[in-house]
Image (tube, rainbow, N blue to C red):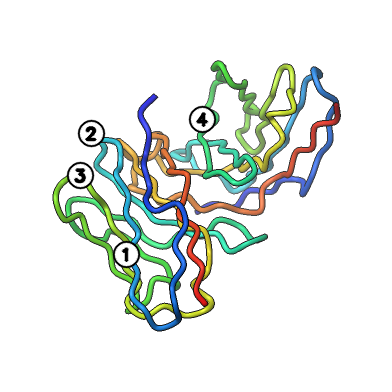
Amino acid sequence: DAKTTQPNSMESNEEEPVHLPCNHSTISGTDYIHWYRQLPSQGPEYVIHGLTSNVNNRMASLAIAEDRKSSTLILHRATLRDAAVYYCILRDANRDDKIIFGKGTRLHILP
Amino acid sequence: EPEVTQTPSHQVTQMGQEVILRCVPISNHLYFYWYRQILGQKVEFLVSFYNNEISEKSEIFDDQFSVERPDGSNFTLKIRSTKLEDSAMYFCASSGGQGRAKLFFGSGTQLSVL
């Protein structure tokens, strides 16, 4: 799996937007960018994924740089429930790839 | 939304005993996975399973581990002779396809080896 780099931790205030960055400078043309999160004492949970274009769903938005070497997960209005570890993961579109989790970014939400 | 179900939620066993962790993946999924997470550490890949055979396994998945899909609905992880270092949270996951398909994870089985 291609490598991703994320900050170890971030803090945000409740009800404010959060931008979680991810660098993936060695991404290949067939790699999808996936984001998962792990809430305390729970299994990982899918958040969003994209290939080239920005993506929106009910949980978050994914902004992908034009050269695809970085991406940003955007939580538009953070709640206390969004406190979790967020993982940015590359997954080859053409392979039955396992997902490899890095250390992710631990997001703290301040009330 | 459909769910991956894991049982039991907690399992305590003595060192050297065999344990079987059970998972019911989402019904129309074809790809199955086991992961583990030792307390305070990252989630580690153990094995992936497709078309009734192991498609990939990590170094952790040695001869003490085996997986099975015995009846078309369950997916099990067996640890033949547990060690203290096998104590971890074990997560099952399933997926409906390759690359862009998302993985659905269960809530895990906490295995404690005494």
Secondary structure under badge 2? loop
Residue drawn at point x = 60 percent, y = 38 percent: A37
Question: Which of the 4 quarters of the picture holds residue B24?
Answer: top left
Q: Which of marks 1 and 4 is in front?
A: 1
Amino acid type assigned to the residue bearing label 1 in the image: Ile
Residue A49, numbered label? 4
* Residue hosting label 3: B73
Residue drawn at point x = 67 percent, y = 47 percent: A104
Q: Read off the chain for label 1.
A: B
Distance in Å between CA atoms under marks 4 and 2? 21 Å
Q: Which of marks 3 and 2 is nearer the N terminus?
A: 2
Q: Are dots 1 and 3 on a single chain?
A: yes
Q: Read off the chain for label 3.
A: B
Q: Read off the chain for label 4.
A: A
Where residue A80 appears, x then y in whole percent? 74, 28
Where residue A40 appears, x then y in whole percent? 64, 43
Label 2 Cα crowd, 10 Å radius (few <14 / some 14-19 / many 20+)? few
Distance in Å between CA atoms under marks 1 and 3? 15 Å
Question: Which of the 4 quarters of the picture holds residue B66?
Answer: bottom left
Distance in Å between CA atoms under marks 1 and 4? 33 Å
* Residue hosting label 2: B28
Q: Is residue A66 left or right of A50 when viewed as pictured?
A: right
Q: Are dots 1 and 2 on a single chain?
A: yes
Amino acid type assigned to the residue bearing label 4 in the image: His
Label 1 Cα crowd, 10 Å radius (few <14 / some 14-19 / many 20+)? some
Residue B20, numbered label? 1
User: Which residue is the extreme one toward the left?
Assistant: B71
Secondary structure under badge 3? loop
Q: Is residue A25 left or right of A92 when viewed as pictured?
A: right
Q: Is residue A41 above or below residue A13?
A: below
Residue drawn at point x = 61 percent, y = 25 percent: A62
